[in-house]
Image (cartoon, helix red, strand yellow):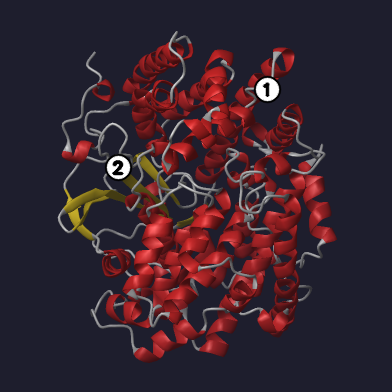
Amino acid sequence: MTNPLTETWDTPFGLPPFDRIEDAHFGPAIDAALEQARAEVGRIAESAEAPTFDNTIRALTQAGEELDRVLGVFFGIAGAESTEAREALMRELSPRLADHASDIHGNRALFGRIEALWQERDALGLGPEEARVLYLTRRSFVRAGAELEGPSAERLKAVKARLAELGTAFTQNLLADERGWRMELDEAELKGLPEFVVSAARAAGEAAGAEGPVVTLSRSLVVPFLQFCPDRDLRRRAWEAWVSRGAMGGETDNRGIAAEILALRAERADLLGYDSFAEFKLETEMAGRPEAVRDLLMRVWEPARARALEDEVRLTAMLHADGQTGPLEPWDWRYYSERRRRQEHDLDEAELKPYLQLDRMIEAAFSVAHRLFGLEFAPLDAALHHPDARAWEVTRDGRHMGVFVGDYFARGSKRSGAWCTVFRGQRKLGGEVRPHVVNVCNFSKPAAGTPALLSWDEARTLFHEFGHALHQMLSEVTWPQIAGTSVARDFVELPSQLYEHWLEVPEVVAEFATHAETGAPMPEDLRDRLLAVGTYDTGFETVEYIASALVDMEFHGPEAPADPMQRQAEVLQEIGMPRAIAMRHATPHFAHVFAGDGYAAGYYSYMWSEVMDADAFAAFEEAGGPFDAETARRLEVHVLSAGGSDEAAALYTRFRGSMPGVEALLKGRGLLDAA
């Protein structure tokens, strides 16, 4: 059988030939690529030649390129367009790939060659990038257990393989719960909902094969339903299903998986000589140690909690004025907060949403990138992984910079959330390779013939993910392991969160926020009210986020909790969590932390990066405006194009001159007066 995954791709810019790729192609292609990678690594380790940078580090970097190529396609679409075959292959692959990585890091001969180079590093005459790659390569081997021997090495290998299995199971259980629940609505239950919510519910019902409109657990539908539905019982049903993802009992319940993951992570850290998984994880991050993370989170928690409690009093009064009794509940907050926003700020999301067309917000993101960095975007006719996905060629001064793919609409085959990934990353090693970057979102798909409309938060999400995409597309390094977003976890969110600021620039809103029916620009009065309310409800938003971040840190302390749900409840009680606010991500659906260890003991990183993004945007304001050319040039040179070529603090300091304090963050969230 001809397998397009093993062929040279004669496609626009070498994009994967999705019109020819079938699920049956992945398994054989990955098997062959794994075998080839093992042989390549074996030749390096067994070489009789004395180790040199080229025959060891360069060769190791290039070993497995075919495997990276095939896996880039598979993992690039696995979360965005899942099928039963892909999910089964993912379950099979996870432990195999973990074993492959363990075999490489546990190869004593290979590590011996790397260690020999490390000991002689000052005499090798390496350039800055090569010296960085040698340092990172050795560090990754040591942190993966290369110095362990005997039973300890074998146990670590088994632990990592099991963790890979559990992370895959957690993700697939969550997806099953999200696509398995829906709440059908009759016409009477649509009363009081704005038209854009009704339209989204009808479209969701049609996609699900239901007879009428439905509410699903897609964030783009359930959140506006909670904001606008006047029926308290319906809000409660939707909210309880939403927060119960991963904890609905049966085969898809994630609570036992979470407990086992935490126990295995603690064992992994112990095998490697660390007091806790958090210490192990933070060793390579900007924060450095758990105490620094807790200090930051608590410095923001106290003023945020105080603001949230003030808001709770106001919202409770509105609840009681409606004739309801008892306290404000979590399923009430968004509804009464939306009503309060309309009353106090004369801002109605139903009035706002027609001005936030998806296509116009994409144009806005592209326009800002052009003004800041000279990038241009041209639609690209290419076969992609789903009919809803779109592609653009990215150029600058005639030079091809990469391909950008946007996959924006929610569907049952797509996991929740929004993310940036790559089919292939940037590198110059072995020749110039430009990236294929993918933004995946979960916006409600409109009815046929009508434009997709976003909420303000969704427009911010679009800009956020595009900031990640710029980090990939502007990357200009030789070595793939330091390209693009290959940086410290608490630095990776800086470009994405910084880019959100340009959505709030008045001239951007004035140009691209145009009415879906009339084409008229957003009225100045509405625009001013929108921008003035930027810090509204930040007490709620900050509390739900920090609660999740603190629970994450506590989970990864010296002792793994035997019952994560009990420990979650204890942590929330210890910090005084307001009863009417829930964690943004409760344990059974906390995919950031349990789907893999990327954000484990690292969910705090959004806030760590926010300290910098507030300060970084201030650099533009101090220089005279949001499109200051020299500030944009420094941002590109020292942050966006540099990847992981140096420590994150060094890169940021070169851009800004010094590291910031937490005051800019508190000011940006409107919490200084609550501190």
- The answer to whether residue 578 is left or right of residue 201 is right
Foreground of the two, 621 or 147? 147
Residue 386, numbered label: 2
Foreground of the two, 180 or 601? 601
Amino acid bearing label 2: His
Q: Is residue 56 above or below residue 291?
A: above
Element under disc 2:
loop
Residue 283 in view in this figure:
yes
Residue 409 in view in this figure:
no
The residue mark sitting in front, 1 or 2, is 1
Residue in view at x 63 percent, y 26 percent: 160
Residue in view at x 53 percent, y 53 percent: 648
Q: Position of residue 441 (x, y in %)?
A: 41, 53
Of the numbered discs 1 and 2, the one sitting upstream in the chain is 1
Q: Position of residue 635 (x, y in %)?
A: 40, 63
Q: Is residue 249 above or below residue 326?
A: above
Quarter of the picture containing the N terminus is top left
Foreground of the two, 409 or 487? 487
Quarter of the picture containing the C terminus is bottom right
Residue 156, numbered label: 1
